[in-house]
Image (cartoon, rainbow, N blue to C red):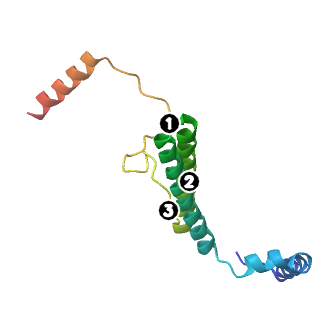
Amino acid sequence: MPLSDHEQRLLEQIEQALYDEDPKFARLYRGTNVRSHYRRRVFRAIAGLVIGLGLLLAGVIVPLIPLGVAGFVVMLAAVTFGMASWQRMTGHRMATSNEAGRPRRPRGPKPARRSVVQRLEQRWQRRQDDR
């Protein structure tokens, strides 16, 4: 939905006030597109993963359990951060179990559960009817 002329003028005034108030901040975000921002975040996450792996290995080589645990936590945080940035950069989200091909059941009252014997009898009856 396009902005009206009045809204466009207000937006330009807000932008100009921002540029006048903090030119360094405005320069930082003026020429940056979103993909390059998320790409930098992915590279930072890779660096965090490498640092976490180094800490984990140092904790294993030098028998310091807290150092190894800290390395694992840093690796886990870096992977989480990197995956979130990658998904935002590409526009793809990981599929949940329902989105991964399983049909969704309609919401509403749940059907009454039948016993195993009743289900087996019903299957047997269907087979007999098919013949």
Q: Which mark is residue 92?
A: 3
Residue at (45%, 29%) from the top-left corner?
A: 110
Q: Secondary structure at mark 2?
A: helix
Of callouts 1 and 3, which one flags the residue occurring earlier in the amino acid sequence?
1
Position above or below: 70 against 82: above
Q: Is residue 53 left or right of residue 15?
A: left
In this rendering, the label closer to the viewer, 2 or 1: 1
In this rendering, the label closer to the viewer, 2 or 3: 2
Q: Secondary structure at mark 3?
A: loop
Amino acid identity at mark 1: Pro
Q: Secondary structure at mark 1?
A: loop
Of callouts 2 and 1, which one flags the residue occurring earlier in the amino acid sequence?
1
Could you tell me residue 77's position as x and y percent?
57, 49
Q: Nearer the viewer, residue 51 or 108?
A: 51
Q: Which mark is residue 78?
A: 2
Could you tell me residue 115's position as x and y percent?
31, 17
Q: Is residue 33 left or right of residue 68?
A: right
Estimate the spatial distance between the alpha carbons at disc 2 and disc 1, rounded to whole Å: 24 Å
Q: Is residue 54 left or right of residue 123?
A: right
Amino acid identity at mark 2: Ala
Mark 1, residue position: 63
Estimate the spatial distance between the alpha carbons at disc 1 and disc 3, rounded to whole Å: 41 Å
Estimate the spatial distance between the alpha carbons at disc 2 and disc 3, rounded to whole Å: 19 Å
In this rendering, the label closer to the viewer, 1 or 3: 1
Q: Would you call the spot at circle 1 few (<14 residues within 10 Å), some (14-19), or many (20 or more)?
A: few
Q: Nearer the viewer, residue 96 or 128?
A: 96
Position above or below: 21 against 85: below
Q: Nearer the viewer, residue 24 or 21?
A: 24
Could you tell me residue 108's position as x and y percent?
50, 34
